[in-house]
Image (tube, helix red, strand yellow):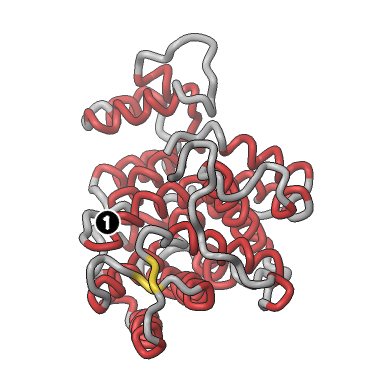
Amino acid sequence: MKNWISRLRGGDNTAASKPAVPEADDADDRPGGMAAEIEATYYRWLTASAGYDAPADLQTRILDQVRALARDPASAAELVPRVPEVIPQLLRSLQDEASNAELARQVAQDVVLVAEVIREANSAYYRPMSPVKTVEAALMMLGQNGLRMLLARIAFRPIIKLQATGFTRVAAPLVWNQSEKCALAASLMAPGLTAGAFEAYLAGLMQNLGLVVGFRLADRVCADGKVPGASEFGLELLAEGRNLSAAIARHWDFPQPVADAIAHAGDPDDENLAQALALGDRIAKLRLLIDANVVDEDDDFVTEGLDNFQRRCLGKLGTVES
């Protein structure tokens, strides 16, 4: 896992009704204001099927375990799968600016990768004039940066969307959906903040890894697939999960700016890549909450929390398949 990362750079509820989600605390009383309220709303939605009023000592136990793993990222990294070998091979070719013919030859060695590349080229995001049917045509459509992002996404999918039991099995696909959307939104935010688009994309894919590990730890101490549902716990778990993700990123030799952006996304200040990640994360969470009918398109979270460009990005995420 370590060396391939550096090569990446070369960058009754119905459909119309809102699910039952516990009432939010007053956003003005919570540190972080609207950003924290979006985080809390997202956590309550994510855990709505299994959240319960867990004892304080159990909540503390889970958070302490997450913090301990952040201090021992080698042990944390053992809790998640490794990246497929075909990915670093292709990334080496991308770094060496291989021809499309050479890239097509390497992609063709993996039938799953062939399907992914052609599917991506035909997606609503690229909107080709006519169906793309060959690997060569798909690579022309994606370009090297698009292919690099696709490879990163393929590499991370089994890591985040891992096979698990308990609540993690329910949460992991939802978290992966948010990760994909966060990565894309962060990459769209990055140029306006003079940050690298691919570094922002990579940070978006990576930042939820610690959260998934946190849910796996919760499954070990909570019975019947339950998880603490309190907003305050959720905010702490999301924050500690980012710290754990950053620690694993450093252990895996991610570019230092990517790891730093993940660590500081909760309080980005003047760090441009962290700002891009924080904005992408917020937009992606709002997209999921809107699609789940938890938040309306004209909610203050959207109309007051996002500017015009960010709202257009929010709309673009609606074309991204989960």
| Residue 249 appears in the rendering | yes
Residue 274: image x %, image y %?
62, 64
Residue 178: image x %, image y %?
47, 50
Rendered-image quadrant of the C terminus:
top left
- Answer above or below: position of 136 versus 153: above
Instruction: Kindly identify the residue that appears in the image at 21 percent across and 60 percent down.
Output: 165
Instruction: Kindly identify the residue that appears in the image at 56 percent across and 35 percent down.
Output: 318
Instruction: Kindly identify the residue that appears in the image at 41 percent across and 88 percent down.
Output: 56
Instruction: Kindly identify the residue that appears in the image at 45 percent across and 36 percent down.
Output: 97
**As drawn, is 115 to the left or to the right of 303?**
left
In the displayed orientation, state which residue is furthest to the front.
12
Count up the numbered dots: 1
Which of these two is toward me, 249 or 105?
Answer: 249
- Answer above or below: position of 202 versus 52: above
Residue 204: image x %, image y %?
50, 55
Q: Quadrant of residue 247?
A: bottom left
Which of these two is toward me, 256 or 285?
Answer: 285
Which of these two is toward me, 170 or 205?
Answer: 170
**As drawn, is 221 to the left or to the right of 26?**
left
Q: In the image, what residue type sits under mark 1?
A: Arg
Residue 48: image x %, image y %?
43, 60
Rendered-image quadrant of the N terminus:
bottom left
Residue under label 1 = 169
Describe the element under mark 1 as helix, strand or loop: helix
